[in-house]
Amino acid sequence: MKQGRVLIIVENLPVPFDRRVWQEATTLARAGHRVSVICPMGKGYAERFQLIDGVAIYRHPLPLEGEGLWGYVLEYGAALFWQMLLAGWIAITRGFDVIHACNPPDTIFLIAAVFKVFGKRFVFDHHDLCPELYEAKFGRRGALWRLQGLLERLTFRTADVVISTNHSYRRIALERGRVRPEQVFVVRSGPDLTHWPIPGSPSPPGACRLGYLGVMGEQEGLELFLEALRCIHGRGRPEVRAVLIGDGPRREWIEAQASALGLSAHIEFTGRLPDGEMQARLAKVDVCVNPDRPSALNDLSTMNKILEYMALAKPIVQFESVEGRVSAAGSSLYAAPGDVEDFADKVLRLLDDGPLRARMGAEGRRRVEDELAWRHQEGPLLAAYAQAFAPGRRGLAYDLPAHAVEA
């Protein structure tokens, strides 16, 4: 198989910390492609260049993390500058045949459009619905919301292949993006079980623990979880504690809210943790929570934390959502959207029913092993790349694995 050359661009997380992007990069490298990645620096990822597992990683400085409208404008503008600069350097030094863009934001198509003039192809890896993300963050529509829609349409129009993270996103690509069905492939963000431990034991009796993993931003709804925890304590259950793993622009505000509600002594904020430590901490909790604030974005998006909870065989409580139920199925209880009292009810139901917790946790682990783990996503990813290289293959020979099918 003649080696193809792939350039992956991601704006919002460093690599290999971004597990989905790293799994894609290493899968493509194992398939014989020469893979380069452009991403921002981040905590623990300060080196400007690294070669890891055959993947060349180019990191750029990002002087600020966007919070508020103009913060995001400055963040994305700085990222676009560095992405264009590094893409030009990689084109000269390592070369690439395909630009693989991971949103948000929907601005990376501008780089792809430049290089398409030189015969390069563009794969759009659709991670977030940016118009819905804007509305979730700022609580309004308007001119900038319409601009997000325009950027999304231009991204879809520029793409030779679209990778969707679930079937709701695939429908967006087909209907809103008007992409042909044969150009759209579903590749879920399943965990790589070779890097996940055998599920651990929950807390001992009398030490009930709730676990959260993920970003601490506006749409994650952690303030709703704090209200639910206060409800639980108000029902005579002060032994219920929580560990919140992750970081984000609203972490300090969430910590202040926990203090104002008298919950600080019952919540541990760990910040971001290395994978092994994160898994070990979550393996010891009884119930994992997903308090994502109900919105169009969260209703249609697949949350990585849900699949990671399931990989650890943990029962889940979350607010009702379309894709939350598609992913978790019987491994989760679903509270009415935004209803913190109902959320508290569901948590207490699980804490008080050990056999139910065990059944739901086992169901989640089984679903990951049988359907959702990364090994089940590699075939569709490679099929997407076979499609990307198919028109005018430019001499590239690509043998599609027999198990690779369009999802």
Image (cartoon, rainbow, N blue to C red):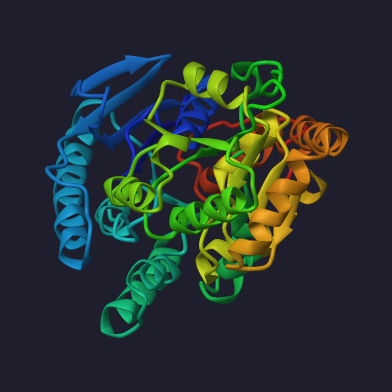
Mark yes or no: residue 407 visible: no
Q: Residue furthest front?
A: 236
Residue 27: horizontal and vertical position, in percent?
A: 55, 26
Side of 330 where 142 appears, left or right: left
Residue 271: horizontal and vertical position, in percent?
A: 36, 32
- Observer-nearest of 158 and 355: 355
Residue found 58% across the figure and 40% down from its top: 238
- Observer-nearest of 312 and 87: 312
- Observer-nearest of 194 and 155: 194
Q: Is residue 287 above or below residue 339?
A: above
Side of 231 where 204 appears, left or right: right
Residue found 34% across the figure and 70% down from its top: 151
Residue found 59% across the figure and 62% down from its top: 340
* Number of numbered discs on residues: 0
Residue 256: horizontal and vertical position, in percent?
A: 30, 49
Side of 144 where 23 appears, left or right: right
Residue found 69% across the figure and 23% down from its top: 202
Q: Please identify the quarter of the rendering in which residue 39 is found.
A: top left
- Observer-nearest of 347 and 170: 347
Mark yes or no: residue 315 visible: yes
Where does the N terminus fall, quadrant-wise?
top right
Residue 186: horizontal and vertical position, in percent?
A: 64, 51
Q: Residue furthest bottom?
A: 142
Q: Please identify the quarter of the rendering in which residue 153 is found.
A: bottom left
Q: Is residue 129 above or below residue 26?
A: below
